[in-house]
Amino acid sequence: MIPLLFSSVLAGLLALLLYQRTVYPFFWVDLIYYLKLRRYGKSLQARMKSGIITYLDCFLHQARKNPNKPFIIFESQTLSYRDVDRRSNRIANAFRAHGSPGQGDIVAMLMCNEPDFICVWLGLCKLGCEVAFLNNNIKAKSLLHCFRSCGAKTLVVGADPDLVCLVEEVLPDLKKDNMALWVVGHTAPSEEFTSLLDKVESMSGESSSDLPKVNIMSNFLFIFTSGTTGLSKAARVGHLKAVLSMAFFEMCGATSEDIIYITLPLYHMSASLLGIGGCIQLGATCVLKKKFSASQFWKDCVKHDVTVVQYIGELCRYLCNHPAVPEERAHRVRLAAGSGLRSDVWRQFVQRFGSRIKIREGYGLTEAGIGFLNYTEEVGPIGRAGYFNKLSMPFELLRHDPVSYEAVRTPAGRCIRAQNGEAGILVAPLSAMNQFLGYAGNQVQSEKKLLRGVFKDGDVFFNTGDLLLHDDQDFLYFRDRIGDTFRWKGENVSTTEVSEAVGLLDFIQEANIYGVTIPGNEGRAGMAAIVLQQDHKLNGSELYDHLVKTLPAYAWPRFLRIQTSLDVTETFKQQKVKLVTEGFDPDVSHDLLYFLDVSQKEYTLLTVSLYQDIVNGKIKV
């Protein structure tokens, strides 16, 4: 009787296991990741109860726990956790001795990747300042806008001559705004600046006072994102989001023994919070690069014994397109973590650089806490959307209008969930774990990111502005960024900002900016549909010179389409859908098309043969 009962139970279990593997093949991997998140959450709560609450607290904890552990390797320098702690103390003490900035002040930082970016940032945190990271590719007009929108009254600029020159372009305006200017050098370029490093040398490396008390739900940073109505928006990043972001590498499978290579710009959340923060969370070592170099990438990995690399999709594509080097097969990299990696590049990357490299593709936003991670071996998805995933991070995909990109609502005013296999707008309910602190100085745009009454009265969801697809196996795929932004060269481009810049030229009457896909390239390249002023001709060289002065290179329109008038909707909004669909193919468009030849500093007529060379990759864009 007992053997028969045992056999029946065993058969039932085997049948159940077979059913699970057939119908829910990712059940166990989803459950294990969910439990891992729960375990991290409990450890985070315990840590906070012990007083380790903020990003700064986490760093100070590692500086006490592993003082001699190498933290930052940069060129010929190696700084331990203690070295960075003491240098950031000296910087804080130098500011304190000067009398400003102080607790509650907003300080803008305009610096390239270097150890002092981190030391200045942490030093300002020790003073209780809120720091605003500025994109070092921006131009003068954008720079002024960034200061004024976030409310900064102090600017710390790196000693890089290009950055100093950029600031000097707007000195009269900065003086009117009573902006305090510091340069991270031993001498000041002019009397308007105060030098920092000469003062740092005479300061004590000890912390001279208790750290300011912090509300975990309050603002920590300002990070600038592409503005859909013009210039960049200063997104507020809370202390809680910053601390949660630090778990990224740990969730990907990195450990304290890893050496992590970061080439992304520190002014982006990816490098500063996920990258540097991820290293701090683990107590790992970071090899920091001033900027990404495809030719040096694998050489650096071998030289520094790198085991983990952080990427964006464009970076991986550059590596795959670069000529082979011996080091690309001699490295010890076991994990690549990041976002924006296309499936074809993903496969090529692993095939070429080593099948032992695990890819951990994720998705996240600067403004809110919603995020995903593909912790499986499936190529292409950005994450999972099963039962356990929604327990830890609630979200919805909403059906949208393909022309207006607005969420479709029922006659009762409620939104409609997208079906599996149908791309939908990603939205997430606001909560303590999914904060949205808004954009500084821009209440209108802050409100536009919120959807109210989505499924019932009183509910409020954050609208990511991204289209995702949920398939029948509960995988999530990124499909597109909607609205008036597109992504190129790893940066968000505001179509309105580009349109305003292009429209300043006297021979251009109107311009409609949009992004177009180019085979083999990540994101979308900028294209401008232009209406010329009556009796004027296109002056490509003048347009190029104007773009150099007004916009960063990633925002330049790479293609032009000359039209007699722009298509608009019944509410006079510019139509982009047809233009995006037709792209830059001269066989499809009946309008004259032009291509930006950077080597000639001119827009040249886009012929069929030139088009073929671009799509075949013979001409790099």
Image (cartoon, grey):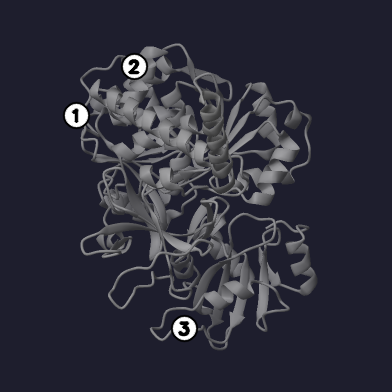
Q: Quadrant of residue 40?
A: top left
> Counting other residues with Cα less than 10 Å from the Cα at mark 2, is it few (<14), some (14-19), or many (20 or more)?
few
Residue found 25% across the figure and 47% down from its top: 178
Q: Is residue 406 left or right of residue 304?
A: left
The foreground one among 575 and 596 is 575
Q: Position of residue 508 (x, y in %)?
A: 52, 78
Q: Quadrant of residue 130?
A: top left
- Tag 1 secondary structure: loop
Amino acid type assigned to the residue bearing label 3 in the image: Val
- 547 vs 54: above or below: below
Distance between mark 2 and mark 3 Cα atoms: 63 Å
Residue found 54% across the figure and 79% down from its top: 507
Q: Which residue is mark 3?
A: 568
- 24 vs 601: above or below: above
Q: Which numbered tag is attached to residue 202? A: 2
Residue found 70% across the figure and 28% down from its top: 299
Q: Position of residue 70 (x, y in %)?
A: 50, 17
Distance between mark 3 and mark 1 Cα atoms: 53 Å
Q: Is residue 538 in sight in this rendering? A: no
The foreground one among 49 and 620 is 49
- Tag 2 secondary structure: loop
Q: Which residue is mark 1?
A: 213
Distance between mark 2 and mark 1 Cα atoms: 27 Å
Sequence-wise first label, 2 or 3? 2
Amino acid type assigned to the residue bearing label 1 in the image: Lys
> Counting other residues with Cα less than 10 Å from the Cα at mark 1, is it few (<14), some (14-19), or many (20 or more)?
few
Q: Quadrant of residue 524?
A: bottom right
